[in-house]
Amino acid sequence: MKRKSLLAALLFLAFLLCGCGAASPPEEATPPAIHLPDGTVPEAAAASLELAAPSPETLARTVDALKQLPALKRVRFTGPLAAADYALFCREIPAVCFEAELSAAGRSFSSSASALDFTGLKPEEAEALSAVLPYLSNLQTVELGSRESSPQLRLSDVELLQKACP
């Protein structure tokens, strides 16, 4: 009888030590859904997205929402996006490659352009353009025209644009 009691106690102890019958570990919590201002709810593991270009009112919320997608590598915006807004996305989320039709200095161009023609650029437009140039990774040439075609452009404007090129 003693032997049976001892054996039962040992089995009970082994049962406790091995964790048999213990509650299973909790399942991993599902991350909360990310809601973009345009109503899009991307998967948390999304690597690429195609979105409407955000309005000035939703720009900051869009940036904040995209920052919450750790697997995101590429975003293509449909519709025109101001060059300054494009630069903001690139600065705030550098691990993501953004693609868009941009507008700056009264002209439209692709963020993937390898050449831009800004003949006739005015000094007040040079600063806006220089803010986006560092983020145009495919850019190889920027045409500014000649003295005759861009008479208002100063040497300091040209230097600003040169420094800004990737």
Image: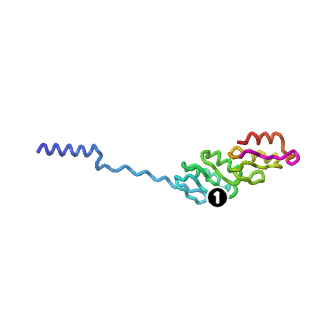
Q: Is residue 30 left or right of residue 126?
A: left
Q: Residue at x 65, y 45 (%)?
A: 91
**Residue at 65% of width from left, 47% of height from top?**
90
> Residue lying farthest bottom?
39
Query: Where residue 95 appears, x then y in whole percent?
Result: 60, 45
Residue bearing the label numbered 1: 52
Q: In the image, residue 14 lies at what x, y percent?
A: 24, 44
Q: Residue at 17% across / 44% down in the picture?
A: 7
Quarter that holds the C terminus: top right
**Residue at image location 80% in from the left, 41% down from the top:** 158
Look at the image and give the residue range highlighted in magenta: 139-149
Residue 77 as seen in the image, left or right of residue 72: right
In the image, is 117 to the left or to the right of 13?
A: right
- Measured as percent of width and height from the top left, residue 83 is found at 71, 50
Residue reaching furthest to the right = 148
Q: x, y percentage for residue 45?
A: 52, 52
| Label 1 neighbour load within 10 Å: few <14, some 14-19, many 20+ | some
Q: Does dot 1 land on a helix, a strand or a loop?
A: strand
Magenta: main secondary structure equals loop
The correct choice, above or below, for 57 with respect to 136 in the image is below
Q: Is residue 39 above or below residue 115?
A: below
Mark 1 belongs to which amino acid? Ala
Magenta span includes 148: yes
Which residue occupies the foreground of this view, 96 or 26? 96
Question: For residue 54: magenta?
Answer: no
